[in-house]
Amino acid sequence: MALRWFLLLSLIGSILLVDVTQSAAQDARKTYIVYMGDKPKNGVPVTPDFHVNILRDVVDSSINNDIAHESLLLHSYKRSFHGFAAMLTEQEAQKLAGMEGVVSVFPSKKRSIKTTKSLCSLGNRMC
C-alpha cells in the first residue's frame, strides 16, 4: 500500500516538474531580430512561410511540443531588408546565428523618443 502511494506521488511530482520546466523555458523567450541581409535582388518575394520554416529548424519541437512555430514569428521584414522578428530563447538565437544566410541575430530593444519639441510646436495641424 505504501509503495502504491509512493509511486503515485512520484508520478504526480514528475508531471509537475515537467510542467514547471516547460513554463520556465517559455518564460525565457525574448524578442530577437534576425537580419538576413538586403532584400533579395532576384525579385522573389519573401513570405512569412519561409521564416517559419527557418524557425522549425531552430526550435526543438521534441522538447516544446505545445509551441506552434507560427506563433513564434512576430514580423517578417520585406521592404527595407530581409529578416524577421521572433520569440526565441538565447540558445535558439545562438543556433540561428550560426545558420547559413543569417547575417546577425540580436535582441530587440524598446526605445523611447526623447525630445524637447512637441509636434504642436513644429506646426502640426493635428494639435
Image (cartoon, grey):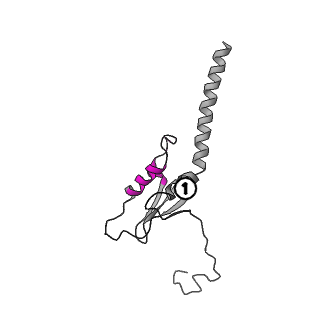
| Identity of the residue furthest to the top in this view | 1
| Identity of the residue furthest to the right in this view | 2
| 124 and 114: which is toward the camera | 114
| 127 and 98: which is toward the camera | 98
Image quadrant holding the N terminus, namely: top right
Question: Residue 43 lies in what quarter of the image?
Answer: bottom left
Question: Residue 52 lies in what quarter of the image?
Answer: bottom left
Q: Is residue 65 above or below residue 127?
A: above
Q: Residue at x 68, y 14 (%)?
A: 2
Percent position of residue 14, x then y: 61, 30
Q: Is residue 54 magenta?
A: yes
Q: Residue at x 60, y 50 (%)?
A: 28
Instruction: Report the side of 99 relative to 18 (left or right).
Output: left
Q: Amino acid at mark 1?
A: Gln
Q: Is residue 20 above or below residue 2?
A: below
**Residue 89 makes an appearance in the image:** no
Question: Residue 44 lies in what quarter of the image?
Answer: bottom left
State which region is magenta.
50-72
| Identity of the residue furthest to the left in this view | 43
Percent position of residue 19, x then y: 59, 37
Image quadrant holding the C terminus, namely: bottom right
Q: Secondary structure at mark 1?
A: helix
Q: Residue at x 62, y 35 (%)?
A: 17
Q: Which residue is mark 1?
A: 94
Instruction: Report the side of 79 relative to 98 (left or right).
Output: left
Q: Residue at x 46, y 57 (%)?
A: 99
Instruction: Report the side of 113 relative to 83 (left or right).
Output: right
Percent position of residue 65, x then y: 49, 40
| 15 and 58: which is toward the camera | 58
Q: Is residue 84 magenta?
A: no
Q: Is residue 63 above or below residue 54?
A: above
